[in-house]
Image (cartoon, helix red, strand yellow):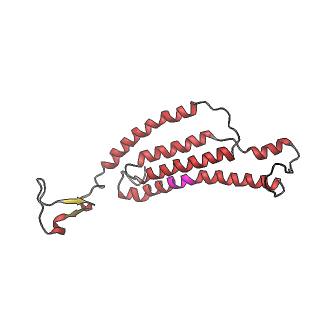
Amino acid sequence: QGDFGDFGADWYVSVGSAIVLTMFLSIFTPQMTKMAYYARSSFLQYWDRGCRSASRHFITQKAAQHDLEELYLGPQVELEELYAGFLNQFFVTLIFNAGMPILTIIFFLYVVISFSFDKFTFLRLYRLPPAFDETAALATTSLLHYAVILHCFFALWMYSNPSIFEQNDYINVDEITGTPTLTPYTTTSFIPL
């Protein structure tokens, strides 16, 4: 149990803003790790060549062929981490975006930036992956419809909070125009902010 029993204004200020900040930072954190590893690998290769540019013929400081190959091959791609990061972003976005639509934009940025960095690192950093079959992709896509169901339930819960649509959030048209506006239900009309 936490301090909030419902999705009220205080929840959005304290918890909602923390979720948005965490989701935004999780766009860049894995990419910075990949780029740091790429920079480290490039520096070690440059240092091994005696601080010379890569040419067809260079002298290495490695004594064994195995050590030289390990220097240039790079790490194995962690496909399960990539799928886990995507599922995390997708589920959190769909669960909370009814009340915080900025998460949709953050998820779009995550997909575009992750695709770009993953494409670069697949080509420049990682060694050739083992032959994966479609099992991981099918398992991931089979979970996506649960996020849609959760989205519907959380949207109903968020929109059912009466403090979200309070009467104080409306402008009285009669006070601004000076002429009374009559409707079948009320004697004054209101425009939502």
Q: Nearer the viewer, residue 111 or 32?
A: 111
Q: Residue at x 40, y 52 (%)?
A: 101
x, y percent for residue 23: 50, 52
Left/right of residue 151 with respect to residue 168 in the rendered view = right
In the figure, 53 relative to 125: above or below?
A: below
Q: Nearer the viewer, residue 150 or 163?
A: 150
Q: Nearer the viewer, residue 23 or 14?
A: 23
The reply to whether the magenta stretch includes residue 186 is no
x, y percent for residue 192: 25, 58
x, y percent for residue 156: 33, 44
Q: Residue at x 20, y 60 (%)?
A: 190
Residue extending farthest to the right is 63
The reply to whether the magenta stretch includes residue 25 is yes
Left/right of residue 29 with respect to residue 15 in the rendered view = right
Left/right of residue 21 with respect to residue 59 in the rendered view = left
Q: How many marks?
A: 0
User: What secondary structure prevails in the magenta region?
Assistant: helix
Question: Within the image, what quadrant is residue 183 found in?
Answer: bottom left
Give the extent of the magenta segment: 22-28
Question: Within the image, what quadrant is residue 73 found in?
Answer: top right
x, y percent for residue 80: 60, 39
Question: Within the image, what quadrant is residue 122 found in?
Answer: top right
Left/right of residue 191 with respect to residue 25 in the rendered view = left
Q: Which part of the image, by quadrant, shows the C terminus? A: bottom left
Q: Residue at x 56, y 48 (%)?
A: 114
Q: Residue at x 31, y 55 (%)?
A: 164
